[in-house]
Image: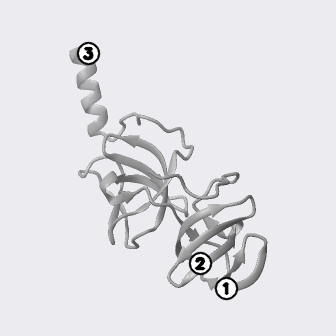
Amino acid sequence: MTRFTAILLIFSVAAGQAAPLTGDGKVLRYVSQRTDKAYLREGPTYAHKVLWQYRHRGYPFAVIAEFDTWRRVRAADGTVGWMAASMLIDQRTVLVTGKGRAKIFANAEGGKLVALADPGAVASLKACTLTACHIKGDKTDGWIARDRIWGVEPNEVFDKLPAR
């Protein structure tokens, strides 16, 4: 590495323009907030301005890029920024979206109504078909329509999440 390259690399990291190791806006994976409070920053250092403070353990994020110990994440509302990897965990969760309460059923095809979930509720993700996902939350375990949650890819189907 030449002296010029090293200086350029240092400058670009300091300016928050560091090229991510991966990421072109596509979702690399989904994660959730590890702590009760997490900061979304303008760039991948603690010196960068805080854009938003999230105060909900388990809140889902889509990782769209990685740089060192930082993850560029997108929230359900489209907000994008950098978060320290230590604030995130690989556990998959989903956010209930839409208007009005979402119905949660006993099985993927429907069946017995077991609960209603308010928009903004966060639940653990267990499995997905093309039309519904199995979620688990406080005193709730059932299937919700995919169009009522954020935190899964459109064609993502699985019986259970792979162990990490």
The amino acid at mark 1 is: Val
| Residue under the image location 37 percent in, 58 percent down | 88
- Could you say whether the residue bearing mark 3 is in a helix, strand or loop? loop
Q: How is the image coloured?
A: one colour
| Residue under the image location 78 percent in, 71 percent down | 109
Cβ atoms at labels 1 and 3 below 8 Å apart: no
Q: Is 102 positioned to the left or the right of 95 in the image?
A: right
Check the image and report above or below for 47 versus 87.
above
Lower position in the chain sequence, tag 1 or tag 2: 1
* Residue designated by label 3: 1
Q: Which of 130 and 79 is in front in this view?
A: 130
Check the image and report above or below for 6 versus 46.
above
The amino acid at mark 2 is: Asp
* Residue designated by label 1: 114
Cβ atoms at labels 1 and 2 below 8 Å apart: yes
Coordinates of residue 57 in the picture (x, y in percent):
39, 71
* Residue designated by label 2: 141
Coordinates of residue 16 in the picture (x, y in percent):
33, 41
Check the image and report above or below for 90 versus 125.
above
Classify mark 1: residues with Cα within 10 Å, few (<14), some (14-19) or many (20+). Answer: some
